[in-house]
Amino acid sequence: MSSGTLYVVATPLGNLEDITFRAVRVLKEAPVIACEDTRRTVKLLNRYEIRTPMVVFHEYNKARAGAGILRRLREGESVALVSDAGTPAISDPGYDLVRDAVAEGIPVEVIPGPSALVAALVVSGLPTDHFAFEGFLPNRPVRRRKALAALSRETRTMIFYESPHRLASFLADASAELGERRACIVRELTKVHEEIVRGTLPELSAEIAGRSSVLGEVTVVVAGAPKTVELSVEEIVRAAVEDASGSSRDLAREISERTGLSRKEVYEEILRQRK
């Protein structure tokens, strides 16, 4: 018996018109739809007169529900996987299901469509040629600050997901660790109360801190670090030697500590230039 196919179906972020003809057809033809919340998915199904039965698959039941879905697939029954909004498997348990299906040789097909991270990136006005999706950072402030500090030298545009009640603390931490970067908050994208706010991280932090509350799905896009020109050891030492009169060893230690270059390599270059 051949196995069924796992269809990974992108659904609207909010506006129910943002769905492809193919997605509607697959959702109608599939024997079952695996969704995070039937109360949310049924609104989409009703809009397009889709009567396919649903099973619940989310973060808190993914082990048990995932096993049931894999069993259906092994027995030849196809399953359409959707998330509450956007493309499944991005910061949700759909990844686990796709991984397990692939490991078992079960066919997986993607039905492309809306994605919050791509939509937020293109509307942000920040560079789109290179970008890094970071998803949700740790909840705890110390761990979140550490994660942001590790990203301080990232030159690509960065995209984060954040919950509305943590947005103010995220922006405060991002301002402290990343400085005066350009950024964009995208909230409730494609929905009635869609909001796009652009500015520097400190400006956005002040804006959100001044609000009594923030509601809805939030994506934050942050500019990468400025790209620096890599100087050779020779160029770095030449600039330092011109303004220094101390011992070569002390100068080598100072340059090494400041730049992270090998002290031995720097010392040898200082001696060569001072001859």
Image (tube, helix red, strand yellow):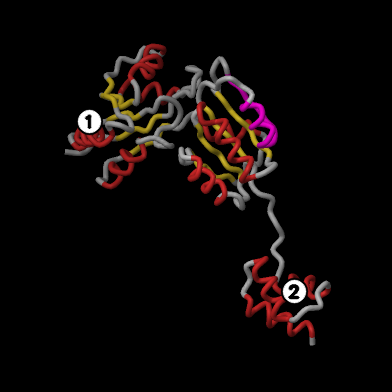
The picture quadrant where one finds residue 36 is top left
Q: Position of residue 198 (x, y in %)?
A: 67, 30
Quadrant location of the C terminus in the rendered image: bottom right
Q: In this view, does 38 lie above or below 112?
A: above
Query: In the image, what residue type sits under mark 1?
Result: Glu
Q: Is residue 139 magenta?
A: no
Mark 1 residue element: loop
Task: Determine whether 98 is above or below 42 in the image.
Answer: below
Query: CA gap, disc 2 to disc 1?
Result: 68 Å
Q: Dot 2: within a 10 Å radius of its alpha carbon, few (fewer than 14), some, or many (20 or more) residues? A: some
Residue 23, quarter of picture? top left
Quadrant location, the N terminus:
top left
Q: Which contiguous range is marked in magenta?
A: 194-209
Mark sitting earlier along the chain (2/1): 1
Q: Name the residue under label 1.
A: 77
Given residues 51 and 221, the one toward you in this image is: 221
Q: Position of residue 109 (x, y in %)?
A: 36, 36
> Which residue is drawn at the image coordinates 51% and 34% (left, top)?
161
* Residue that carries the numbered disc 2 in the rendered image: 237
Disc 1 crowd rating (10 Å Cα; few below 14, some 14-19, many 20+) is some
Residue that protrudes farthest toward the right in the picture: 242
Q: What residue type is labelled 2?
A: Val
Q: 143 or 59, which is in the foreground? A: 143
